[in-house]
Amino acid sequence: MPDGFLSPVSAHQTRSPEGMRTIPCTALDLTAALVVFTTGLVIDTRLDTSKLQGSLFELVEHKFPRAGARLALRNGAYEFVIPHIFDANNPPVAFTSEDFPEPYRSSGRPELPIHLSDAFDSATPSIHPLPPALDEYLWSRECPTSLDGFLVPNTPVIHVRVTTFQDLTFIGLTASHITLDAVGVRTLLHAWTLLLSGEPIDSIQGMEWDAQPFKVFMGSAAATTQTLGGVPEPGLVVEHSCVPKVTTFIVRVPKAFLDDSSREINQSLQLRGSGEWVGSSDVLLAWWFKTTYSYRTIDDETSIHIHIPTDLRGMCIFPGPSALEDHDPYIHNATSLISVPPIPANGFHTESLAELALRIRRSVTASQEDLDGITAQLRMACANPSIPRFPNAPGSEHSLQSNWRKARFRELDFSGACKRTAHVVLVLGPIPSTPAPGLGIICMEDDHALWMCQTRTRTHWDNIRRSGIVAFI
Ligand SMILES: *[C@@H]1O[C@H](CO)[C@@H](O)[C@H](O)[C@H]1NC(C)=O
Ligand SMILES: *[C@@H]1O[C@H](CO)[C@@H](O)[C@H](O)[C@H]1NC(C)=O
């Protein structure tokens, strides 16, 4: 990582670059600074690439100028540097594309999991490889894969790669996590589809280049420990050098299974006179951790820490009557982290799906209701901006599980960029450089299933496969 992240402001202050607007990154933006992340969409028709590019440029220039920023580290602080004028030398987005005249499914390319429905029993969970060949459809070669890459002068913070086939379009949007969170990606993509569909640019809600909704949390002194729902929040990002090599698989879990399980759990809670409940995302995570730790021995007491980002937009933590999302689209990180109290690895054997789902739900509810705790956490983060380190406590394991259901990527309608209806048929959350081991994303929901991208070491996947607990396709 670059030097000087928290170094005291250097003696010779560099002046703000000419012809540029600058705005500091917030502490929230920097929490996942080392992560570069991609949202990958597969659309069921060929889209018009020049229309896509033209409308995206127009949108960023006029409505989301900060999405057209560059990153800079100046006088010891990270900031967004936004060109006053976007042009060929200062494009709002790094946009590249490639077109293949033939259908995707014609020349022995790897089958996408959505095309494989005949090959597996769709009523039970299944694990699918993420074909490495997709990389070239979602990322250009010039796309940075690290924070340092984004700090190269005049590198746009957002890179979009479009690959078209006669029957499919791949759109990969890659950004430093400093720039966007998942709901922010949704905000941007949704506005893009509106503009494509012919909505006048003036009626599209954008974000002011200098919006700083989290500024209110800066300045006041902070408590010494960050807690949310009573659990200390650790940093989750490790440096690249100590990350074991990881592989991403797609995990498909049928909704019928999740809904039946949560209904059953809800009923038995009700019978016991409890007011508690669980939802399908809780059951999904409980199932995933039961599955992933199924091969561990019964005396394995390694602490497993599960962390779940929660969206702060719409929470009553901002001063005044307005929640963030009502009036102002905000694309940068507006999440805080829920930490489920650690569970010993063997607990995933001994506890039922219901007990585990309930543990997860309790942590989520306790954290989301703890508005004072969230506010304290934000003040604390803002008073101590830093790139957090992974808690290196030997013998514990951490897993960050992001839920993109709220971002509703499947509902995006790209019809404006073709002459027919266009549906998003697959959403991928692959991470080119993943400094967080055990990372997972609930990336998509269709009529029949929830889909996750899960990242683990090869050995871990081999062990899950050998346990025979879930089908590998
Ligand atoms: C957003 O900020 C929160 C609070 O600092 C942090 O826990 C979370 O990891 C950050 N997420 C991203 C994507 O930067
Ligand atoms: C479980 O209960 C909650 C709260 O009553 C409800 O929102 C949810 O839909 C229920 N889930 C199922 C599958 O019945």
Image: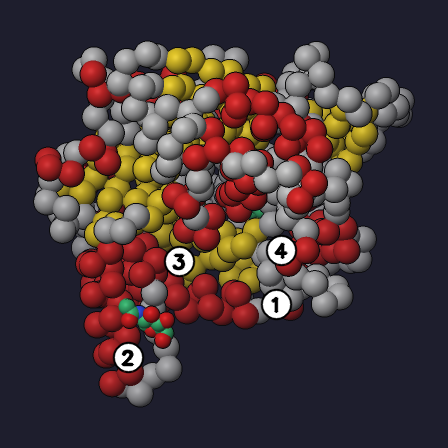
**Label 4 vs label 2: CA separation?**
34 Å
Residue 269 disc label: 2
* Left or right of 244, for residue 177: right
Q: Which numbered disc flags the more N-terminal residue, 2 or 1?
A: 2
The reply to whether dot 4 and dot 1 touch (C-beta < 8 Å) is no
Image quadrant where one finds the N terminus: top right
**Residue that badge 1 annotates:** 371
Q: Which numbered disc flags the more N-terminal residue, 4 or 1?
A: 4
The reply to whether dot 3 and dot 4 touch (C-beta < 8 Å) is no
Residue 81 position by quadrant: top right
- Residue drawn at point x = 56 percent, y = 36 percent: 198
**Residue that badge 3 annotates:** 342
**Label 3 vs label 1: CA separation?**
22 Å
Q: Give the number of the mark in front: 4 or 1.
A: 4
* Vertical position of residue 341 compared to residue 151: above or below: below
- Residues packed near mark 1 inside 10 Å, few (<14), some (14 to 19) or many (20 plus): some
Q: The disc labelled 4 sits on which kind of residue?
A: Glu
Q: Give the number of the mark in front: 3 or 1.
A: 1
| Residue in front for this viewpoint, 330 or 269 | 330
- Residue drawn at point x = 37 percent, y = 82 percent: 275
Q: The disc labelled 3 sits on which kind of residue?
A: Pro
Residue 342 seen in the current view? yes
> Residue 434 in the image: x percent, y percent?
44, 31
**Residue that badge 4 annotates:** 325
